[in-house]
Amino acid sequence: MKILFVVALLGALHPAPPAAGPRHTLMPVPAGLAWGSGRLRLDGRFTAVVHGVPGDARLERGVARFLRRLERTIGVAVGAGTTGLTITVRGKGAAVQGPDEDESYLLDVTDTGATLTAPTTVGALRGLETLLQLVEGDSAGYAVPAVHIADRPRFPWRGLLIDAGRHFQPVETIKRQLDGMAVVKLNVLHWHLSEDQGFRVESRRFPRLQQLGSDGRYYTQEQIREVVAYARDRGIRVVPEFDMPGHSTAWFVAYPEEASSPGPFTIERTFGVFRPAFDPTRESVYRFIDAFIGEMAALFPDPYWHIGGDEVDAAAWKDNPRIRAFMRAHRLADNDALQAYFNRRLSAILTRHRKQMVGWDEILHPGLPTSTVIQSWRGQESLGRGAKEGHLGILSANFYLDHMRTAEFHYLQDPVPAGSLLTAEEARRVLGGEACMWGEHLSPESIDSRIWPRLAAIAERLWSPREVRDVPDMYRRLSVMRGRLEEVGLGSEGHTPRMARQMAGGADPAALAALLSLAEPASLGERARRQALTTLTPLVFAADAARPDPPAQWELRALATAVLARDGGSAEARRVLASRFARWPGLAPALDSLGATAPLARDALPAAQALGRVAAIGTDALEMLGGGPATADWKKERLAQLDSLERPQGLLRLSVIPGVRLLVAGVPVP
Ligand code: ACM
C-alpha cells in the first residue's frame, strides 16, 4: 500500500530538482523526488533488514559495502538496533546482466525509517548509492531528510571505455574506476583490450599473443574473471573490445600470417593510425578469430562483443595485389565494401558464439545485420543514420575524456537531444552513451584525474531526465561528488599536488602546485603536435600533473558572475578575485627559480608567464568595473589578448581565462 502511494505521488512530479526545500547534492539527479518532513537520524542503532530472494549473495555484499561506507560517513559503527532501512528486492536480476536489466528503485525515507524497494538487485544497488548521497550533517549529528524518490535511468547503456591497449592499466586501477562508476550509477565498462601498442589478455589457445604482443603487461584469465565478478557485484557489465581489422599490430607480432602485409611486426611504440590490418581474404583469419572468440566468450559473459572496426588504413589492403584480385572476384568495389564483407563474416562468427556485435561507426555499411550496435565516435549524425537504418546505437562523440574538455561541455551533449529528428521508435534504438578514456597519454597514476570527476557529469546526462541541464547546479553538486569519489578510493583530488611534489624533487612545490591548479593539460591532439611521446616515455610532465577542468575554472567564472551581478555585485567576490590577481604574477619568478633544480617544472613556465598577463587584464577589468575609464578599444584588445592567452602555453592551457573573459566582457563602455 505504502509503495503504491509513493508511486502515485511521484507520478505527478516534475523531474527537475525542487525549487523549494533542501537543495540536494544527488548525482545523478533522480527521475522523481519529493521532500517529506522530518529526518531520519543515523546512529549506532541503524541497521539494514533485507527481504530479498534467498541466496542473493550479491545483494548481501552490496548491503555490507553500503553499511561500511555509511559508518565511515557518520563515524559510528552501525547495526546495533533493529530500525533503519528495510530493503525489499523481488528478483536477483538476469544471470548475465544485459541492457534490459530493470535498474529502477523506490526509496522512501521518513523520520522513523527508510524503505528501499526494487524489482532487481541492481535496482537496489542503485538505491543504496542514492541513500548514501542523502546523508547530511547537522548540529545533532547525521541524518537523512525525509524524501520519496522513484528513480530509473533514462538510457539503459551508460558506459566508460578504458583503453588498456596503449598503456596497460593494472587490475586495481580498473577496480577503482568500477567503484566510482557504481557511485554514479554507470553500468558498462567497455574494456579496450587490444591495440597496435599491446595485446592485453592471456589466451591459452594462442599464448603467443600475450607472450610476444604485450611486453608482459596483460591480464591473466583469472584477473579477467575477477574484474568481471567485481563489476557484476556493482551492477556493471563488462564489454570487451578486440579491435579489428585495424589497430591490430600487436596481434601480428605473434601471428604475422594473419596480416594483409608481410611481416615481421613489432609492438608499436608511437601513436596514430598504423598500416597493419587483418587480411579479410584469408579463410585462416576467420578460423583464427573464431577460435579466439570461442575461448574469450567464456571469459566475458556479456551478450555484447565489440569488434572495433575504426580507422582502417586504406593502404593496408590496396597495396596487396592478391587482395585486389579477391575484391575484383567478389565484386567488392572498394575498401569499405571489403570491410563490410569482413564484418559480415565476423557477425556470423559472433552469432555462433551467442554474441551481439558492437562496432565503431565506420562499420555502418549497407548489408550489415541490423542486430549490430553502432557506437558513434565521429558525431551524432552517424548515430542517427544507424538508428534510421534499424541499428541500436551508443553515443561517444563529444564524450571523449582525452580531449580535456570541461564537465560542462560533456554535460550538455545528449544522445537524443531535444529537437532530435529521430522518430520515437528510432530514438528508442539509441541505447545511451559511453565516455571514452583513450590511453595515449594515460598512466595508472594519472587515470583517476582524467576520468573523475567529469565522468559524474556524463553519468548524470545518461541517467537523469533530459531536462536536467542546469550547469551551475551541476558544478555545485559535482564539487560534493569530488569528496564522495575520493571516499571510494579515487585519487583525482590529490593528483596535482602529489605530482607537483614529485616534480619539485624536495624543493618547495607551492608555486608549481598553484600554477597547475589553474591550468589543464593540452588536449591529446595539441600535445601530440608539441611533444613526441612513445609508450616508453614516463608520463611525469606538467601536462600529466595538471588535470582537465580543474575546480578553479568554474570557481573563477562563479566569482566573475557574482562581481557582475545586477545589484552592484558582490564586494566579497571582488575582494577574492583582486587577491587572486595580485598573487598570480608572482608564480612565474617562483617557478623560474624552482626550475633551476627541478628541470621538469620548467615546462610550466610559459603558462605561469601567461598567467601574469591574465592577472594584469583581470586587475584592470576590476578597476574599470569600479568606474575606471574603459573604452571600446580597450575591451576589444583585452578580449583578443585573452583569446590568444587561451591557446596552449607549452603543454598547458590556462583554465581561468573564461572567468576573466566574463569580467572584461562585463565592463561597460560608453
Ligand atoms: C576512435 O576514436 N577511433 C574510436
Image (tube, rainbow, N blue to C red):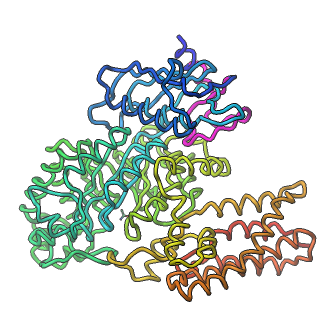
Residue 198 forms part of the magenta stretch:
no
In this rendering, the answer to whether 138 lies above or below 480 is above
Residue 246 in the image, given as x and y percentages of width and height: 25, 67
Q: Nearer the viewer, residue 605 or 389?
A: 605
Q: Is residue 377 left or right of residue 565?
A: left
Judged left or right of residue 338, residue 82 is right
Q: Is residue 300 left or right of residue 4?
A: left
Q: Residue at x 58, y 30 (%)?
A: 32
Q: Is residue 282 among what the camera can see? A: yes
Q: Quadrant of the C terminus?
A: bottom right
- Horizontal and vertical percent position of residue 300: 23, 46
Location of ligand 1 given as a quarter of the image: bottom left
User: Which residue is found at the position 59% from the left and 35% from the top?
Assistant: 134
* Residue farthest to the bottom, as pictured: 596
Q: Is residue 404 above or below residue 70?
A: below
- Rendered image quadrant of residue 16: top right
Q: What is the magenta range? A: 8-36
Does the magenta portion include 21?
yes
Q: Residue 241 in the image: state x and y as whole percent.
A: 27, 55
Q: Is residue 632 above or below residue 189?
A: below
Between 30 and 338, the residue placed more toward the observer is 30
Magenta stretch, main secondary structure, is loop
